[in-house]
Image (tube, grey):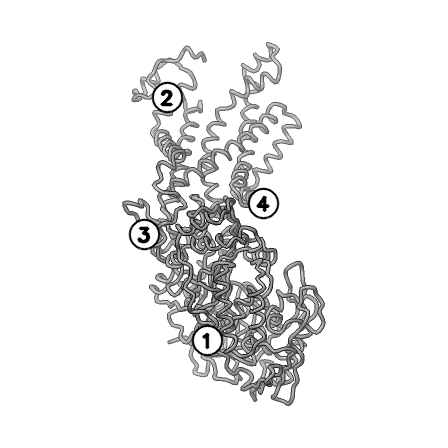
Amino acid sequence: MRVHRKAGRLVALTAAVGLLAAACGGEDSGSGDTGSGDGGDPKTFIFGASEDPKTLDAAYVSDGESFRVIFQIYETLVALEPGTTEVVPGLAEEWEISPDGLTYTFHLRDGVTFHDGEPFNAEAVCFNFDRWYNFTGPAQSGDVTYYWQTIFGGFATKEIDSAPDTSRYQSCEATDELTATLTLTEPSSALLAGLVLPAFSIASPKAIEEGGTEIEATGDSFTYSGGFGSEVVAGTGPFQFVSWDRGESLVLERNEDYWGEAPALDEIIFRPIADPTARLQALQAGEIDAYEGVNAADIGAIEGAGDQVVERPAFNVGYVGFNNKLPIFQNPKIRQAIAHALNRQGLLDAAYPEGAVVANQFLPPDQWGYNDSIEGYEYDPDLARQLIEESGETNLTLEFWYPSDVSRPYMPDPQAVYESFAADLQAVGFTIVPKTVPWTPDYLQNIQGDGLGQLHLLGWTGDYADPDNFIGTFFRQDRPEFGFTDPTIQAKLNEALTLTDQAEREPLYEEINQLLYDYIPGVPFVHNQPLLALAGDITGYTPSPVSLEYFKLVDIEG
Amino acid sequence: MSVNEVVAGEPGGPAPATTEAAARPPSSLGREALHRLVRNPMAVVGMVLISIFVLVAIFAPLIAPYSPTDNSWLDQVRPGQYPGPSAEHWLGIDPLGRDVFSRIIYGARQSLLIGVVSLALGAVAGIALGVLAGAFGGWVDTVVMRFVDIMLSVPGLLFAIAVAAMLGQSLTSVMIAIAVVNVPIFARLLRGEMLGQRGADYVLAARSLGISRSAIVFRHVLPNSFTPVIVQGTLTLALAIVEAAGLAFLGLSGSDPSAPEWGRMLTDAQETLTSAPMLAIYPGLAIVLAALGFTLVGESLREALDPKFRR
């Protein structure tokens, strides 16, 4: 939201003008819709998104804006208990896992149909799994099929260098009409938890085939030119696709044939509004009913106007990462000095919502594997100065990277976090050189791809409830971001992933957290409770720790 | 025009009645202009504003009670609640726990620096182009002036944004961006003035005496063409301060977001506009007053030096 604030402002202005136009033109098109059964006005829930989804082809995306829409249209074999990370039956009513952890038998729900009228059955399930496993070309890029690669690894034929060499996926077999058997090549403790991700949405095979799923790579970006996911969209979920006017609105309507309890809403509209201030204004003007990424400083204004602010559980971590390859960070006193120099509590009190807590490990407290006995490094600038002196380091100049044009769940305002921490570090004797680039694609590429960050701000929001999703992602393999290659910790993380018994895994992760705490490959600073704003008349909106919220539970009062 | 003709007046003293002034014998152009200037209340207000601004900028470390980046008061801040003015913090504390007054004071430094450097760069380049066109005339004049026209055809701030965005995030690029905008203004001004002097009696006299062309240009025409440049320079300084703030507001400024800079303070304040509007008003006021000072002096100078205003 900064440099390029100019760009942000222009976008906001354009969006605002567009909104106005859409609001004026939208009235009559909406009124022609069929109302709900009770004959009243149709209930339309308008969500102010920060951008358009990339595509509604669930297998090709990993970002929150796409997932939010996809999550309402499609369903997965296993689902989430609303508001938790607990795995509950979804399209599969029940399932069995073989003792060796290699075979998953899913018993599917009967009487479910796709939005295009096609029947949902085991064949449709396996069609989707086979499609994912047989992705070719650019679809094998980690930017496109991130979650397939995280949960299942590689593909039938490895076509691009960055794709994983091996796959955990062996086969999917439609044993009978409503039984799908998934076979793996090696056990994976994270599989079931991972299958709740919208990336594993089961789509209508007919829609996939008829729409087409072409994808083109241009440099680092991808164009989803297939009709499936943009024109042809068919899942089994409570809402079905109506229209998508990019940059303006994406409209869904209630699926009258939904197998579960009928949703209260008649219609959902997603409107992209890039600028957070413009989203706040749109809510206050009654143009939207909800948005996420609420600034803690705006809570008073929102609640004062009769609207609501709700918190997501803190299932994330924000951290100051070090590039541990650099000689200065190989000096443990320097790492300790930084940990003691940062006034994390002060920053959280001043700029974060009340529910935000100081992080002392890379895992959020609600995730099993969290080590309760770790107390955390105290804010103690004098001790930090002393540690620097003892370290013997004389060149204390560090580049400190932070992203612009972005708000993250763990970091609503990256520049504020940077400024606060930079002042803390300068107060104990470091010389800080600010470095900032826009979030996508530069920042992630610079930090995660090229490891340019000496110090950098980043974080993670959990995708599913498994400790490996946090610390495994960061430290199981050598990653340029941390330049961290501790063989003991890496071996333990790999061991913990292949074990399937949680009782065995839990102490192992607690031990790993202690080792990471002692080493300090970076300083975690926050587990934030991201805020959502809702119009005053919205009920039933259940915030989810993994940001997957069922709009089928939402209602509008009155 | 002899310096000896100067009437021994009282330069700083109270101005005598205007009728008396009009009755005076003709005095030196410069002296007369100065008289008119100090008698103009607008000019005096402007000069006071400029003096305060410059003194604050120079002596910022002595005036400001704290370092502009010291965030020691972070623990007094809560989201949406920022301590207002108090005995320790005259203008309160910003959302990151820093003293607003100290940041405003140090901000003057940045503004003055950008203003002066960009003015100097722009004026030097512009004057060079103007002299080139004015002295040589002919095709050189045509080429230079068409080039200048092209530069002038792009709106100033837009041009500065484009240049600053191209050069990247740094103070130098901001200075260059603002300087570039000023180049055509000075070039055009000087060239016009020099062309006007071409047929002047003293030029013809110098020519008839056989003085070389370059000597005429540099020793006679150029010094006599400088008056409007000084006026323009003062006005440009005001514009440079506003443009620097504008660029900073749009995110084009030095690479350090913690640096005290009025434009950037304004941008940051925008996020808390509903809860703490004063955080936007302070830097806004500082920008307005500094720019006003230079504008008042510039306009008064123009009046004082313009023969048309002479009584």
Tell me residue A260's x, y (percent): 50, 84
Tell me which corner region of the image, top left, top right, bottom left or bottom right, holds residue A182.
bottom right
Residue A75 vertical position relative to residue A323 in the rendered view, above or below: below
In the image, what residue type sits under mark 2? His
In the image, what residue type sits under mark 3? Pro
Is circle 4 on the same chain as circle 1? no
Q: CA distance from mark 2 to mark 1?
A: 80 Å
| In front: label 2 or label 1 | 1
Q: Which residue is mark 2?
A: B35
Q: CA distance from mark 2 to mark 4?
A: 46 Å
Tell me residue A438's x, y (percent): 54, 54
Tell me residue A543's x, y (percent): 44, 72
Q: Nearer the N terminus, badge 3 or badge 2?
A: 2
Q: CA distance from mark 4 to mark 1?
A: 48 Å
Q: Secondary structure at mark 4?
A: helix
Q: Which residue is mark 1?
A: A84
Q: Are marks 2 and 4 in contact (CB under 8 Å)?
A: no
Is circle 2 on the same chain as circle 4? yes
Tell me which corner region of the image, top left, top right, bottom left or bottom right, holds residue A497.
bottom right
